[in-house]
Image (cartoon, helix red, strand yellow):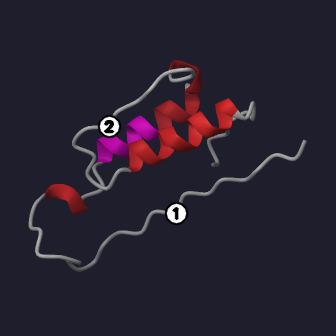
């Protein structure tokens, strides 16, 4: 069975793309730390449903979706993904 490569590329918004002036455009440092931690500990979310609230740019939700897909397909997630 062939392992699928998953890449998540994050680009910082340099100008507002809407009239929203709130925090939804921010890549919070805590999201990066939590995403890295989850990549190192995917067993903690295996078989669980995850709801991300106050997502900012949604990085943690994207990482969790990727991890859950890999876990479901029995592929070992790697930090490089």
Image side of residue 18 versus residue 74, left or right? left
Image side of residue 26 versus residue 80, left or right? left
- Would you place residue 22 above or below residue 77 in this image? below
Q: Residues within 10 Å of mark 1 (few under 14, many from 20)?
A: few
| Label 2: which secondary element | loop
Mark 1–mark 2 Cα distance, whole angstroms, equals 20 Å
Q: Nearer the viewer, mark 1 or mark 2?
A: 2
Q: Is residue 80 magenta?
A: no
- Would you place residue 35 above or below residue 47 in this image? below
Number of the label disc, if any, that sits on residue 54: none
Outermost residue to the right = 1
Identify the residue under disc 2: 52
Q: Residues within 10 Å of mark 2 (few under 14, many from 20)?
A: few
* Residue at 46 percent of width and 48 percent of height: 62
Query: Horizontal and vertical percent for residue 59?
Result: 40, 49
* Residue at 41 percent of width and 43 percent of height: 61
- Would you place residue 46 above or below residue 53 in this image? above
Identify the residue under disc 1: 9
Query: Horizontal and vertical percent for residue 79?
Result: 62, 41
Which of the 4 quarters of the picture holds residue 34?
top left
Q: In which quadrant is the N terminus drawn?
A: top right
| Label 1: which secondary element | loop
Q: Which residues are magenta?
A: 29-35
């Amino acid at each position: 069975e062939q392992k699928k490569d998953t890449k998540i590329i994050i680009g910082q918004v340099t100008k507002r793309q809407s009239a929203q002036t709130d925090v939804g455009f921010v890549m919070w440092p805590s999201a990066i730390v939590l995403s890295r931690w989850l990549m190192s500990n995917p067993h903690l979310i295996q078989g669980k449903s995850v709801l991300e609230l106050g997502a900012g740019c949604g990085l943690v939700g994207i990482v969790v979706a990727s991890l859950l897909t890999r876990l479901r397909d029995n592929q070992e997630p790697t930090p490089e993904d």
